[in-house]
Image (spheres, rainbow, N blue to C red):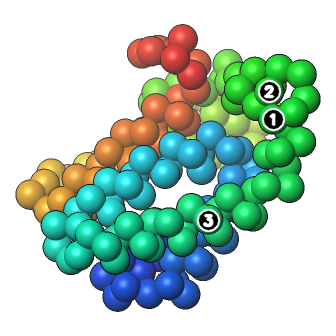
Amino acid sequence: FSLYLIILALEKNSVGIIIIASVMMAVGGYYDFRVAYLSFFIIVLLCIYFYKKYKLRDSVRLLLIYLITFIILNIFWVLPAAFISGGIGNNLLSRPLFGDQYWSLAYAISLTHPFWNPYGITWFSINSIPVYYWIIPTFALAGFWINRKNIVVIIFSVLMVIGIFLTKQTDEPFGYVY
């Protein structure tokens, strides 16, 4: 939702909307900072796109406001974490997530949790993916394919691939990257 607000702020050149988007991304960053800093690359792509559509100065100004707000909202934990032994990179960003052995590429694409089944939740038991869970991803991919010439759709397609990659966690392909 915050990416939608960023698009809206860039289209309307609105400082208020960009601050709301930054607050929303900061709240998401409190849960897992990796999502927030990877989303920043998508935001830069959006600013590059809107630079071509509007003025460079306006896009850069809104990007700076977004960054400053985001940094201010995260400074309370980034500074202490940076000065502890090992720094941020070693302690926070390299830690594994609980349950990564349960996830696979199929669960990431189908938007299914491994513990879900048609009858309820079976904790710590990997369930098969029902066929109807593939309907939404199929329509989403078809929508991306049909509108593939729209740059915003391309940007969100890149975001989709990054999201699938992060959701599959340590599963192949490229399991060692995560």
Tags 2 and 3 touching, CB below 8 Å: no
Amino acid marked by disc 1: Ala
Q: Is residue 61 left or right of residue 2?
A: left
At 16% from the left and 67% from the top, the residue drawn is 52
For the C terminus, the quadrant is top right
Viewer can see residue 143: no
Nearer-N-terminus badge (2/3) = 3
Viewer can see residue 9: yes
Nearer-N-terminus badge (2/1) = 1
* Residue 48 percent across, percent down from the top left: 27, 59
Give the residue furthest to the front: 57
Q: Mark 2 points at which residue?
A: 87
Q: In which quarter of the image is residue 86?
A: top right
Amino acid marked by disc 2: Gly
* Residue 17 percent across, percent down from the top left: 51, 83
At 52% from the left and 17% from the top, the residue drawn is 177
Viewer-closest of 110 and 91: 91
Q: Is residue 65 above or below residue 116?
A: below
Amino acid marked by disc 3: Ile
Mark 2 and mark 3: span between their CA atoms?
22 Å
Q: In which quarter of the image is residue 93?
A: top right
Mark 3 and mark 1: span between their CA atoms?
18 Å
Number of other residues with Cα within 10 Å of mark 3, as a class: few under 14, some 14 to 19, many 20 or more:
some
* Residue 112 percent across, percent down from the top left: 55, 43
Q: Name the residue under label 3.
A: 68
Q: Which mark is residue 82?
A: 1
